[in-house]
Amino acid sequence: MLIIAGFLEVDPDRRDAFVAAHVDLVRRARRSPGCLDLAITADPVDPGRVNNFERWASRAELEAWRAVAGAPDMGIEIVGGDVMEYGVSGVRPVFG
């Protein structure tokens, strides 16, 4: 399993447009084989921050998705951020 998580920084006045532009991509990704979860969301505290979270069953399925994803070209510059990929060796429920 792979997790991709972190945040992007955009102009605070354009953040909501950035998130809205990715709604179709999120819907399609969640239907894609191997996508266990994906979210691109506005941060509730920082007006210029967009949170990114993805969980994929395998690298092959992630790469297959990336080949067809077609990220939107919305003309909103990403000015910073920190998004990393994590390999998962084990999982367990948090609440129980």
Image (cartoon, grey):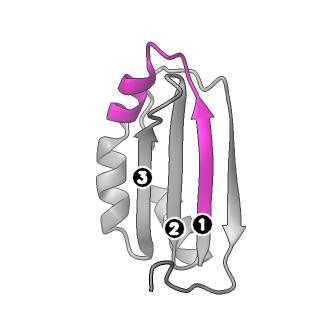
Magenta stretch containing residue 76, yes or no?
no
Q: Secondary structure at mark 3?
A: strand
Instruction: Check if mark 1's residue and mark 2's residue have beta carbons within 8 Å.
Output: yes
Q: Is residue 11 left or right of residue 33?
A: right
In the orientation shown, which residue stands out farthest toward the top?
13
Q: Amino acid at mark 1?
A: Ile
Residue 66 x/y as whole percent: 52, 58
The residue indicated by pointer 2 is 55
In the rendered image of this protein, does residue 85 appear above or below residue 12? Answer: below
The residue indicated by pointer 3 is 39
Q: Amino acid at mark 2?
A: Arg
Q: Write the residue at 62% across / 48% down.
A: 6
Q: Quadrant of the C terminus?
A: bottom left
The image quadrant of residue 84 is bottom right
The residue indicated by pointer 1 is 3
Residue 32 x/y as whole percent: 36, 68
What is the crowding at mark 2: few (fewer than 14 residues within 10 Å), some, or many (at least 20)? many
Seen from the viewer's position, the closer of residues 6 and 25 is 6
What is the crowding at mark 3: few (fewer than 14 residues within 10 Å), some, or many (at least 20)? many
In the rendered image of this protein, does residue 96 appear above or below residue 10? Answer: below
For the residues labelled 1 and 3, the Cα–Cα distance comes to 12 Å
In the rendered image of this protein, does residue 20 appear above or below residue 28? Answer: above
Residue 2 x/y as whole percent: 61, 72
Bounds of the magenta span?
A: 3-20
Q: Write the residue at 52% across / 48% down.
A: 52
Seen from the viewer's position, the closer of residues 77 and 92 is 92
Seen from the viewer's position, the closer of residues 61 and 46 is 46
Q: Amino acid at mark 3?
A: Ala
